[in-house]
Image: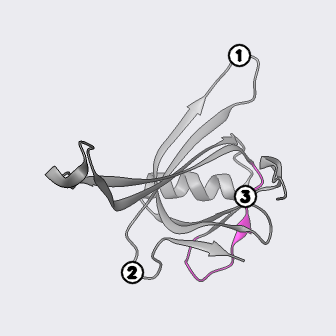
C-alpha cells in the first residue's frame, strides 16, 4: 500500500458541473467529512445488542484559504457565499486519484486575523441539491 501525503491531495472547483475545473492551490488543512444518519432497528432477537442501519449520507468539506483577493478561486468562494450560489468541487487524493465530487453550498466563510499570521478564511461546504450532479465518489 502506498502512503498518500496530504500535501499531494488535489482540490478542484468549477462554476458549472460540466465546466472546466481549476485546481485550488490556495488551501490547506482540508477535511472531507462523510457520515450516515442511522435508524434504530433493534429487535428482541438481537441478542441484547442495539441494532442500527445506515440511512442518509451527509457530506461536508472544511478548509482554510489565505485571504488573497487577487486569487481567482478565493473570489469564486467569496462570491458564491454572498450570492448563495452553488460551486462544483472535486476533492481527490491525488491528480488522478479518487474522492468526493459534488455540488456544494458554502455555509461558512469566516475570516481569522491572528496577530502573527496571514489573514485566513475558514470555509465550510455542504453537499447541496443539484439536478445535474448527484454526489459521487469518483475514481480517475
- Location of residue 104 in the rendering, given as x and y in whole percent from the top left corner: 48, 62
What is the C-alpha distance between the residues marked 2 and 3?
A: 24 Å
Q: Is residue 96 above or below residue 10?
A: below
Q: Which mark is residue 115?
A: 1
**Magenta stretch contains residue 107:** no
- Residue 43 placement, left or right of 20: left
**Which residue is outermost to the top?**
115
Of 5 and 130, nearer the camera is 5
Q: Residue at x 83, y 53 (%)?
A: 3
- Location of residue 121 in the rendering, given as x and y in whole percent from the top left corner: 61, 38
Estimate how packed mark 2 is, as few (under 14), some (14 to 19) or many (20 or more) residues with alpha carbons within 10 Å: few
Estimate how packed mark 3 is, as few (under 14), some (14 to 19) or many (20 or more) residues with alpha carbons within 10 Å: some
3 or 1: mark nearer the eye:
3
- Location of residue 103 in the rendering, given as x and y in whole percent from the top left corner: 49, 68
What is the C-alpha distance between the residues marked 3 and 1?
A: 26 Å
Of 24 and 94, nearer the camera is 94
Q: Residue at x 56, y 44 (%)?
A: 123
Q: Quadrant of the C terminus?
A: bottom right
Q: Earlier in the sequence, mark 2 or mark 3?
A: 3
2 or 1: mark nearer the eye:
2
Residue denoted by label 2: 131
Q: Residue at x 39, y 60 (%)?
A: 57
- Residue 36 placement, left or right of 52: right
**Stretch in magenta:** 15-26
Specify the principal SS of the magenta part.
Answer: loop
Q: Which mark is residue 24?
A: 3
Q: Residue at x 60, y 65 (%)?
A: 89
Amino acid at each position: 500500500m502506498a502512503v498518500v501525503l496530504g500535501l499531494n491531495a488535489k482540490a478542484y472547483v468549477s462554476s458549472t458541473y460540466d465546466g472546466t475545473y481549476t485546481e485550488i492551490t490556495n488551501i490547506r488543512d482540508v477535511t472531507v467529512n462523510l457520515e450516515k444518519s442511522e435508524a434504530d432497528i433493534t429487535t428482541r432477537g438481537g441478542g441484547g445488542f442495539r441494532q442500527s442501519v445506515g440511512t442518509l449520507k451527509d457530506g461536508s468539506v472544511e478548509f482554510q484559504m489565505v485571504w488573497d483577493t487577487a486569487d481567482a478561486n478565493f473570489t469564486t468562494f467569496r462570491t458564491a457565499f454572498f450570492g448563495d450560489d452553488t460551486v462544483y468541487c472535486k476533492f481527490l487524493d491525488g491528480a488522478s486519484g479518487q474522492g468526493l465530487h459534488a455540488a456544494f453550498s458554502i455555509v461558512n466563510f469566516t475570516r481569522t486575523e491572528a496577530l502573527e499570521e496571514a489573514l485566513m478564511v475558514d470555509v465550510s461546504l455542504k453537499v447541496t441539491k443539484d439536478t445535474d450532479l448527484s454526489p459521487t465518489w469518483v475514481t480517475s
